[in-house]
Amino acid sequence: MRVCRCSSKDELALEAALAGAERIRKALHEKGRANIVLATGMSQAGMLSHLARENLDWGRVTAFHLDEYIGIRATHPASFRRYLQERFLSQVKLKAFHAIQGEKEPIAEVKRLNRLIGNVDIDVAFVGIGENGHLAFNDPPANVDTELPYILVRLDEACRRQQVGEGWFKSAREVPPTAITMSIRQIQEAQCIICTVPEARKAKAVQAAVEGDIGPQTPASYLQEHSRAYIYVDPDSASLLGPSRDPVVIEVPKLGELRSLRAGSEHFHLLVAADFSKMQDPELGEFAD
């Protein structure tokens, strides 16, 4: 896991989209196709807007749906299929989008989805973190032992209150109590995970997911085990985090190597962090020449 701290919510959305687009571009170059997972919710809106504007060969990209309520149709105002149609699918022409059909018989629908995803390699999974630490609709305590790609789950009260708070439903009673979701293990199978988590209301969940113990009570904590999981946070959602545990350290090459960059009339502008007290005046002068 890497935590990517951004200066604002808008920067977070852009940086996450660019990182995800590069992973898709890499898969298209290496394999000729790409498979992605799409999430929904207010945290994804800005990122999806930027992602849809990326110049990619979307006709070679297949998308899988992360989660959906059981018992509502795609026309329902809170349907995640409707969300994706309005914010992403209407703007790009994918090779295929495998939606979760929440109005279908749940067990049969889960079996259908599991057959579809089968042995498919997911290149990029776009996800978020819930206020209760959920990952997709895997609420605590999450079923982390199942090997099924999609599972049936019951939503806890905190999750249902979040849906009301975001304006999707008028009351918690209106929120469907059950859903179909991609499992933790299936999300972890993705080659790369782009997790966007803005806003102060997610600060406690971000802290628990990034700095807390790994376990089913904080489902998003399992992202710590993924070497290519990138958590994009803004100042509000990162407000409870301590200093970065994995600072980026770039080794500065020797001066002779830097001077060798000069070629003809080309000029290189370098910003170098160095201990100038250990440099001899002739060296410094030649470097600045």
Image (spheres, rainbow, N blue to C red):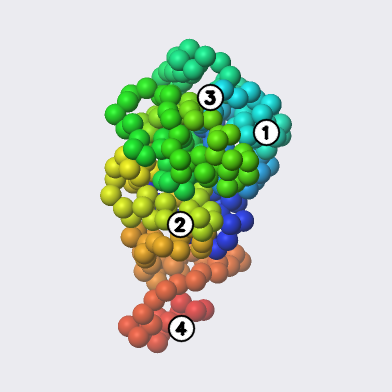
The residue tagged 4 is 285
Number of the label disc, if any, that sits on residue 203: 2
Q: Is residue 286 above or below residue 6?
A: below
The residue tagged 3 is 70
Q: Earlier in the sequence, mark 4 or mark 3?
A: 3
Q: Nearer the viewer, mark 4 or mark 2?
A: 2
Crowdedness near tag 4: few (<14), some (14–19) or many (≥20) residues, C-alpha within 10 Å? few
- Asked which secondary structure carries label 3, the reply is loop
Q: Check contact, mark 4 vs mark 2: CB within 8 A.
A: no
Q: Earlier in the sequence, mark 1 or mark 2?
A: 1
Number of the label disc, if any, that sits on residue 77: 1
Gap in angstroms between the C-alphas marked 1 and 2: 27 Å
Gap in angstroms between the C-alphas marked 4 and 2: 49 Å
Q: Amino acid at mark 2?
A: Ala
Q: Nearer the viewer, mark 1 or mark 4?
A: 1
Q: Nearer the viewer, residue 249 or 128?
A: 128
Q: Is residue 54 above or below residue 282?
A: above
- Asked which secondary structure carries label 1, the reply is loop
Q: Amino acid at mark 1?
A: Pro
- Asked which secondary structure carries label 4, the reply is helix
Q: Earlier in the sequence, mark 1 or mark 4?
A: 1
Crowdedness near tag 2: few (<14), some (14–19) or many (≥20) residues, C-alpha within 10 Å? many
